[in-house]
Amino acid sequence: MSSLVDYKLLETPTKGLIPLAKRNKELKHNITNDCTIPHRSLNITTKGECFIDNCEMYLPFVICNILDLERLEDVWSNPLAKELQKDVEDKKFTWCAVEHCRIMERDLHWINNKGQEFYSIYVNVDESCNLACPSCRTDMILHTQGDDYNRQLVYAEHIVNLLRNFNERTHITLTGNGDPLASNIMRPFVTNWIPNDNHTITLFTNGLLMSKQLPDSKILPNISEFKISIDAGSKEVYEVVRRPGKFDKLIENLDWMHENKPEGANIHFRFVCQKANAHDVVNFVELTERYDAECSISRLDDWGTFENFAEEDVVDQLDHPLRPGFLEQIREVVDLPYVSIPYNIIKYL
Ligand SMILES: C[S@@+](CC[C@H](N)C(=O)[O-])C[C@H]1O[C@@H](n2cnc3c(N)ncnc32)[C@H](O)[C@@H]1O
Ligand code: SF4
């Protein structure tokens, strides 16, 4: 049985996350905020590993493999999970990456706008995608056969079966590391799953396959959020940062979504800053307005895909030639109520 004694940080930290982020065991912050995230979160990786936080680097313990679970609720009552939950309840946060997970800023709970608690499940079992955005990968990844494909498909099918028997209020995010509508491995979610009334879904996607895959899918009525990564506001920029996506196809899909989204579903566009889009911020925000959406603008992380990351890093490279123009655009949009920009960018204004 795993135990805290076996604790070790992931040897190959997930790309984009801060390797070896410091834990409160070392930092010794006195934190008074509450957190119930490890009681209600599940994040499943491409290896079927189950973590009980939104991000594996926040609380880097593999609780079990998804195939070990006969019922979803068993992950939160596992002895290792209990030990971690108790540590967090006692506000020690011994193993938590407290300077990254936002516990220093506020209480952390999964609570909806009616004040009801819910479970949050991130399904990250496949990296397959129809695009090869330069910030994310150097080559196209699209699994269609082989051992990894077969194994990951089994994870996806198993999760769908577990969800069929899980009636608690639950929000499911499809998917954080590939594209849910392009991946063959994620197909069981799109074609075979009928979510129940307590299930809501964030569709996290490049959006290019919505009009093709969603009309026949039973998940459409349960989508409460469309989170669409665009990274641009113009055709010229889009077709560089979202290779080999086509801007016209994106617009076609956004129009379809606007017409067909469930009532009340939230639309959220995402923009990750890099050299090729540093001048396209205002255009992006105008696109957001056109679709009555909200948007967020975030910093680029080094996922090892650029030969010279500093050249791309228009936010933190203080002498970057594109930085003044970029910050000027940020100043123009920062106060708009539907635009969200994190502190790590705003601090430079
Ligand atoms: C990997 S994608 C998976 C979901 C979906 N395919 C999409 O693009 O929205 C998740 C998010 O990571 C963002 N992303 C890609 N490369 C990044 C990087 N180097 N740093 C930070 N975020 C990045 C994408 O823009 C997207 O919003
Ligand atoms: S669409 Fe998403 S998963 Fe696909 S390559 Fe781009 S960022 Fe990565």
Image (cartoon, rainbow, N blue to C red):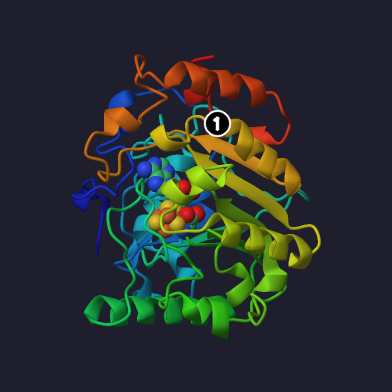
In x, y percent, where is residue 147?
23, 80
Q: Is 78 or 264 nearer to us in this picture?
A: 264
Q: Residue furthest front?
A: 236
Q: Residue at x 34, y 60 (%)?
A: 63
Q: Is residue 210 above or below residue 164?
A: above
Q: Secondary structure at mark 1?
A: loop
Q: Is residue 111 above or below residue 158?
A: above
Quarter of the picture containing the N terminus is: bottom left
- What is the x, y in percent for residue 197? 72, 73
CB of residue at label 1: within 8 Å of ligand 1? no
Provide residue 342's location: percent of width, then percent of height.
54, 29
User: On screen, 318 above or below 55?
Assistant: above
Q: How many numbered marks, from 0 up?
A: 1
Q: Which one is in front, 253 or 192?
A: 253
Residue occupying image coordinates x 66% and y 57%: 225
| Mark 1 crowd level (few <14, some 14–19, many ≥20, 10 Å Cα) | some
User: Which quadrant is the C terminus positioned in?
Assistant: top right
Identify residue type, mark 1: Asn
Quarter of the image where one finds residue 70: bottom left
Residue 108 visible, this orientation: yes
Q: What residue is pinned by disc 1?
A: 33
Q: Which image quadrant is residue 97 in?
A: top left
In the depicted view, which residue is nearer to us: 201 or 115?
201
Q: Residue at x 23, y 34 (%)?
A: 308
Q: For ligand 2, which image quadrant applies?
A: bottom left
